[in-house]
Image (cartoon, grey):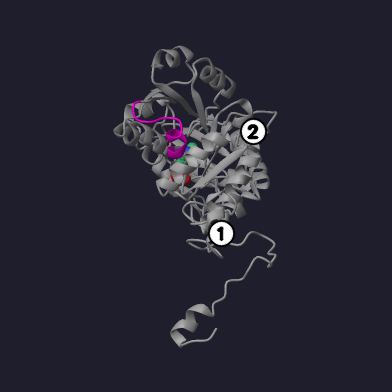
Amino acid sequence: MTGKFETKVLHSVKKQEKQIKSKVTPIYQTSAFSFEDLDELEGFYQGEGNYLYSRSGNPNPDELAMAVAALECAPAGVASSSGMSAILAGVLCVAKAGDHVLAADDLYGGTYHLLKEELNDLGISTTFVSFTNPDEMKAAIQENTKLLYSESITNPLLRVENLEEVVNFAKNHGLYSMVDNTFATPYHCTPYTLGVDLVVHSATKYIGGHGDVTSGVLVGKEDLITKAKSKVVNFGANVSAFEAWLTSRGLKTLALRMKAQSSNARGLADAFCLNDNVENVYYPFNEATEGFGAMVSIKLKENIDVNQFFKALSWIKIVPTLAGVETTVSHPLTTSHRALPHDACESLGITKQVVRISVGIEHLDDIVLEFNRAIEKASI
Ligand SMILES: *Cc1c(COP(=O)(O)O)cnc(C)c1O
C-alpha cells in the first residue's frame, strides 16, 4: 500500500482471505461483504453468493440456525436477536392483522405480553385457554384462528405439554402449531418430529447455556422459515455475529450440560420430597428421557419466609433467568410472571411461596446442602 499516512493507516489493515483454515468458524464481525465486480454482485441476487449485508445474512447466525435446526430434526432455521424476536417472527409468518391465535394460558410472561398487548395492538388477537382442556380449546376456536401456541415444558410449574394432542388438535382444525422448546431443549424433546410446524428457542437459555448471550432460534419447514427470515431481516431483529458465535460455542456442550443438570435436578427434586418444609415439588420425571430437563420448582410451606430463604442462600444467586451452568433461583411471581395478572397467577398456582430453581452442574451434595440449610434458616 502506497499513499499518504491517512490512507495507509486504513488500507494496510488487510483482510485475511479464505485460505486460512481456522478450527472453528471465525466471528464475521462485519456489517457487509465485499464484491469483486458487478457480475459477482449480480450473482448474489441470483442466489449464488451467500452474503451481502449482515442484517440480511451472516455466517455466524446461519451456523447457529443450522445447528439448532439439525438438532431439532427440522429442515430450516433462522437465528434472531432474542427468544422474543424469534417468537415474533414465528407468529408473524403464519398470522397477520385480522387473524387469531389460540394460546396456552400458562405461557412465559414475555410471550403472554407479546400476544396479549403488542400483537393485539397490531390486529392479531389471542385467546388464552388451558391446554389441558380440549373442550375449552375447541370452544375458543374462531373462523380466523391460524395458530396454536404452547410450550413443551411450562414455566414455572413445569407442566409437560402433550405435544401429540396439540399436533392432532391443530391438524383437525387446520391450524399451524408452534411450540417453545426452551425448557426441554432438543436433548429431551424434538417437537418438530411429532408434527409441530414451528419450534422456537430462547437460545439465551440452554442452547447458549452460559448466561452470557441473548439470542433466539426458530426452526421449521423451508417455506415458513423463509417467511420468518424476511420478518427478522425487515424488523432488524437479527442477532449479531458475536452473540451468534458465543451461542454456537455454548451449544456444543448441550448434551453434557443437560445430562449433568437433569440428573442433578432429579436428585434435588428427590431431596425436596423428603423436606417437611416443602409443600410441593414440581419435577415431572420421565424414565425414557431421564428427566424433563434441569428445572425444579418448589412451593415452600407457609411457615417459610420466602425472602429469608433467598437471603439465606450463600453461593446460589437470585437471577431472573435460567439455564446457566451455575445453580440459580428465581421468584416467578415478581419476575418472569409479573406481566400476568395477579389472579391469573393465583389460579395457575404461582404464589408467593413458589421458587424456581435452575439446576447447575455443581456437585449434587452441595446443591442439596445449600437448599436445605436455607430452608431451615427461613423457618418461622
Ligand atoms: C426467556 C424465555 C423467552 C424469551 O427469550 P429472550 O431470549 O429473553 O427473548 C421465551 N420463552 C421462554 C420459555 C423463556 O424462558
Q: Is residue 65 left or right of residue 228?
A: right
Specify the farthest residue to the front: 39
Q: Distance between the residues labelled 2 and 1?
A: 55 Å
Residue 373, horizontal then vertical, whole percent: 53, 45
**Residue 330 in sight from this viewpoint:** no
| Residue density around tag 1, few if under 14, some if 14–19, many if 20 or more, within 10 Å | few
Find the magenta span and give its range.
88-98
Quadrant (top left/top right/bottom left/bottom right) for the C terminus = top left
| In-front residue for pair 152/9 | 9
Amino acid type, label 2? Gly
Dot 1: element? helix
170 lies above or below 192: above
- Magenta-drawn stretch contains 95: yes
Residue 314, horizontal then vertical, whole percent: 50, 52
Amino acid type, label 1? Asp
Residue 346, horizontal then vertical, whole percent: 37, 27
Residue 291: image tag: 2
**Residue 291 in sight from this viewpoint:** yes
Residue 39: image tag: 1
Respond yes or no on whether mark 2 lies under 8 Å from ligand 1: no
Residue 226, horizontal then vertical, whole percent: 52, 39
| Of pointers 2 and 1, the one earlier in the residue sequence | 1
Q: In this view, does 66 lie to the left or right of 156?
A: right
Residue name at image x 61 percent, y 62 percent: 26
Q: Give the image quarter of residue 128.
A: top left
10 lies above or below 155: below
| Residue density around tag 2, few if under 14, some if 14–19, many if 20 or more, within 10 Å | many
Q: Give the image quarter of residue 183.
A: top right
Q: Look at the numbered discs 2 and 1 and tell me whether their residues touch, using CB distance below 8 Å.
A: no
